[in-house]
Amino acid sequence: MELRHLRHFIAVAETQHFGRAAARLGMAQPPLSQSIMRLEESLGTRLLERTPRGVSLTTAGAALLAEAKPLIAQAEMAERRVRQAADELASLSIAFVPMCAMRIMPLAIQTLRRQWPGVDVRLIERGSALTAASVKNGSIDLGVVVNSAADVSGLESSTIERMRLVAAVPASWPLAQQASIRVADLAAYPLIMFPQQMSQPVFAAFEAARREAGLSPKVTQQARHPYTMLNLVANELGIGLMLDSARHLPVDGVVFVDIDDIPTSFDTEVSLIWTDRPHKAYHRAMLDIIRELAAPTPD
């Protein structure tokens, strides 16, 4: 005896008509009749009697109806609870370096939520090395890392972004009016930088350019968080050196200006990383979404 046969039987018993029951169930009448016949065969007794106006229940049919309705209701409740539990447990963890994927990540989460509204996306800010280690040990599903700062051996990876060093300039300062500048143009201004250990790619790119230009810049302030640096710039305490992803952190009083003579070899390459172990469907969906958003758009 299968639950679908019981559902078919309840529909016929309640409507007392095969045609109306078939319409309610959204199926043709012949398969419905066959389903009832199989149910009767499995129980070894007749459940319905045909009448000129439809069907009526036999004594056995009336007894089955009394048992079948709460049984189906219980089965449907169990199904709902299982689905609800599955939705509550559906989660996707993504670790990322704060200045990376700032354009892509919000768009990716919005897209995933439209496709998989029950999935809980957890974002964890951490450094590239720890992110790679966390993906390897399975405590994190996906990671976004700076390639030069992470050991991604044994992981799947896809480059999603290349970032360049830019100058965050107080809007009222002369350099803010220029489309681009050179490193030498920074010589007369106080500079704000991240600590070397926090942003090695930025430090290395600027060091290479300033040595080429023969400059000894005046680094008057360090900041550990992008918003802290931008707030210092907005208050005219100096020019901040940041990756160009900071353009997605708009702060009043700050203008981002390209630096022409930073070698492209010092561009910061950012990758999405994951393991090749089996992933759930929404994990694979997020991989596809991020890679699609990262793909260059045709001119």
Image (tube, rainbow, N blue to C red):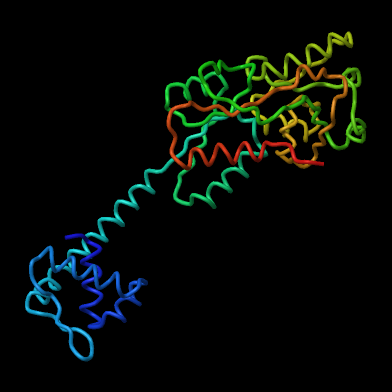
Residue 104, x across and y down, in percent:
65, 39
* Residue 223 percent across, percent down from the top left: 68, 24
Q: Residue 260 occupies which quadrant of the picture? A: top right
- When the figure is inspected, residue 151 is found, relative to residue 259, above or below; the finding is above
Which quadrant would the C terminus be assigned to in this image?
A: top right
Foreground residue, 222 or 138?
138
55 or 72: nearer the viewer: 55
Give the quadrant of residue 30. bottom left
Point out the image quarter for the N terminus. Answer: bottom left
Q: Is residue 202 above or below residue 173?
A: above
Say if 159 sits above or below 91 in the image.
Answer: above
Measured as percent of width and height from the top left, residue 39 is found at: 17, 66
User: Residue 112 vs residue 255: left or right?
Assistant: left
Q: Is residue 58 left or right of residue 176?
A: left
Q: Residue at x 89, y 11 (%)?
A: 213
Residue at (78% x, 35% y) in the render: 234
Residue 15 image point, x, y percent: 25, 82
Residue in the image at 48% along x and 38% along y: 283
- Left or right of 107, for residue 134: left
Task: Give the total number of marks visible in the rendering.
Answer: 0
Direction bottom: furthest residue: 52
Give the side of residue 232 with respect to residue 31, left or right.
right
